[in-house]
Image: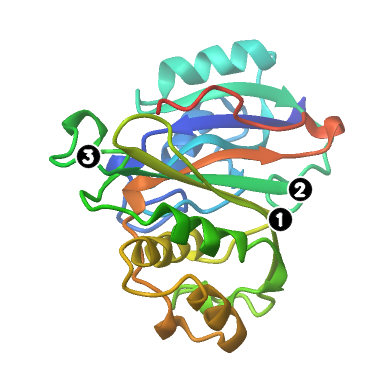
Amino acid sequence: MERRVRIDLAYDGTAYAGWQLQPNAKTVQGVVEEALSRLHGGGRVRVRGAGRTDSGAHARGQVGDVAVATRYDDAGLARALSRMLPGDVRPRRVLTVPEGFHAQHDAKSKTYRYLIDTSACGDPWRRRFALAFPHPLDEAAVDAALALLPGTRDWSGFAGSACTVTDRVRTVSEARRLAPGPGLCAFVFTADGFLTHMVRNLVGTLLAVGARTIAPERVTEVLATADRRRAGPTAPAHGLCLESVVYDAAYGGASGGAEPLW
């Protein structure tokens, strides 16, 4: 019998053109659907993801849902996927959920983490997952800018040109800077949803604030005017990671949970 399952995924997105299916491009959704279709008794399946990670971005707590007909129980399906998926895409959990579950629409919040290597020469072991930024950061200025971000507002000024949604009001509940280790800086953002390139545009703006090329108050101007031109550049995708997605307990609670690598 067919049932709906939730699949929590972690992946290194370096070799992929993002999560979303695209013609003539290798995507995370594509390789997951290919593996699941071989385990499904009724042909091709379609996986719905919690969010569309960009080309080259990563995830430790992506969530997908799909209807499957298979002889495997949840644990068995996770093991089968582990054997069939490439090594840079890993199932962290498979859980049978109510038929009405939707990985995107039922998400309560999402957390993204952006990692920056601030060491003088850069660490080659981090180059796939951290932006090399060998410049001093005015941490007080960055923290002042971060303090202006939490709240419910229209985020059009930090949306990418590819953003097509008309409702751009989101609630950001967390925006903070971490120092995970020597020569490392991380920005963490939690919200009920994010616009296209929103986190990467926020990071680019914060780095400009840290480099003292713009003032911390600029983030308020960008929000008030919805003028993307007033914000900083778009940070590269490879420093970005979808850390976790939160759901009600009836749907399995939060994804992620493992300690970050850095």
Q: Upstream in the sequence, badge 3 or badge 1? A: 3
Q: Nearer the viewer, mark 3 or mark 2?
A: 3
Local secondary structure at mark 3: loop
**In the image, is 204 to the left or to the right of 93?**
left
Query: How far from the left and from the top, in percent, is residue 83?
Result: 43, 15
The front one of 197 and 53 is 197
| Image x and y of residue 10, in percent | 48, 30
Look at 49% across and 77% down and name the residue there. 218
- What residue is disc 3 on? 119
Q: Amino acid at mark 3?
A: Ser
Q: Is residue 56 visible?
A: no
What amino acid is labelled 1 in the image?
Answer: Asp
- Which residue was labeled with disc 2? 108
Q: Residues within 10 Å of mark 2 (few under 14, many from 20)?
A: some
Circle number at residue 171 = none
Amino acid carrying mark 2 in the image: Lys
Is disc 1 placed on a helix, strand or loop?
loop
Q: Nearer the viewer, residue 70 or 116?
A: 116
- Tell me which label, 3 or 2, sits earlier in the chain: 2
Is the N terminus in the top left, top right, bottom left or bottom right quadrant? top right
Residue at mark 3 to residue at mark 1: CA–CA distance: 33 Å
Residue 130 lies, with reference to residue 91, above or below; the image says below
Q: Disc 2 on helix, strand or loop?
A: loop
Q: As drawn, which residue projects farthest toward the left? A: 121
Q: Which residue is mark 1?
A: 192
Circle 3/circle 2 CB separation < 8 Å: no
Labels 1 and 2 touching (C-beta < 8 A):
yes
Tags 3 and 1 touching, CB below 8 Å: no
